[in-house]
Image (cartoon, helix red, strand yellow):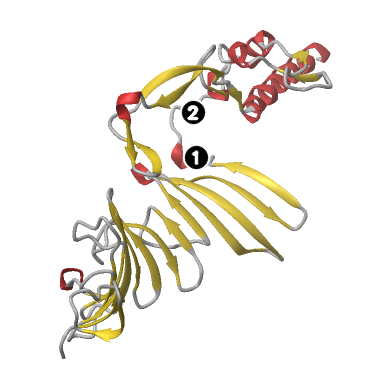
Amino acid sequence: MALTKIGKEGITGVSNSSNATALYIDSSERVGVGATPNATFGSHLYAQGTPAANKPIISAYSQGNSNKAGLALFNDAGNRGIWTDSSNLLFTATYEGNSTEHMRIASDGDVSIGGTTATAAFNLVGTGGSNVQIQNNIASGTNTIVSIGFINDNGLIGSIQSGGSSTSYETSSDYRLKENVDYTWDATTRLKQLKPARFNFIADDTNTLVDGFLAHEVSLIVPEAISGAKDAMAVETRYTADDVETQGDTPSKNVGDPKTYSSSKIDPQGIDQSKLVPLLVKTIQELEARITALEA
């Protein structure tokens, strides 16, 4: 079968004319839109824009005997692939079916981003073995709960669980994860150094007074309860004029290495007040022991 072409530049209908460049169908029944089908990409459907540089804009194809069918998306920065196999929808770094996988949607609807296995309703995989999982319909006694789990190389290190009529916030506390356990430390002296205060937040137009702490003061007594650094400012990523490239009528794109600058926005410290609870409990125990001794 000869190469069949359709339409453009005064050509209507089906033609073999060199001026007919709108649609191509080759002898292998591959279809090209705006260009001859490119066998390099194994494309069943190959669409090319202008300027093309022999690169498709979109290409639909299958991969041999691997039960995979894919859609490749291209631009000047590279290409990405969307694949199906026997049971998953895969999003890959390049159009090849064996490329690095960035996301998958399993046949049961579970989603994994950054990993190759969808083990929960939603699974976000980071570097170093860390990931966040959202699970639904987990049986717990007579209740069904929804759980958000936080995982690293040590396993599950914390979760947020909701079921029935309440939500709980949990952090790992298994004895097998701990060492240097000490029950003899002085809690009362440390507790007395904390400085509870009443204040309002600047952003609160109602100036409502609340009870709490100043994070940098607590960091001197219970540093593990505080995140961030005192007086830290947020860091912004910016591109200079030399890093901007204009692409015709399309918006400019950033190229080159971004520069980082300190911004005028604060990078606020945070406090996990649950980490003050052991200090409170130990102080109560110490005071109770003193009262018992006095009563004796």
- Residue 51 drawn above or below residue 268: below
Q: Position of residue 282 (x, y in %)?
A: 66, 23
Quadrant assignment, res 65: bottom left
The front one of 151 and 184 is 151
Say which quadrant the C terminus sits in: top right
- Residue 286 drawn above or below residue 275: above
Residue displayed at 54% across by 18% down: 223
Residue displayed at 53% across by 41% down: 172
Q: Position of residue 243 (x, y in %)?
A: 31, 29
148 sits to left or right of 164? left
Q: Position of residue 144 (x, y in %)?
A: 67, 64
Quadrant assignment, res 251: top left
Quadrant assignment, res 289: top right
Dot 2 falls on a residue whose secondary structure is loop
Residue displayed at 20% across by 69% down: 41
Q: Position of residue 200 (x, y in %)?
A: 77, 17
Residue displayed at 57% across by 51% down: 148
Dot 1 falls on a residue whose secondary structure is helix
The front one of 10 and 211 is 10
Determine the CA span between mark 1 and mark 2: 9 Å
Name the residue that disc number 1 marks: 175
The front one of 155 and 250 is 250
Residue sitting farthest toward the bottom: 1
Asked if the residues shown at circle 1 and circle 2 are in contact, with their CB atoms under 8 angstroms apart, the answer is: yes
Say which quadrant the N terminus sits in: bottom left
Name the residue that disc number 2 marks: 181
Q: Which mark is residue 270?
A: none
- For marks 1 and 2 on the same chain, the one whose residue lies earlier in the sequence: 1
Type of the residue with mark 2? Val
The front one of 284 and 24 is 24
Label 1 crowd (10 A; few <14 / some 14-19 / many >=20): few
Type of the residue with mark 1? Tyr
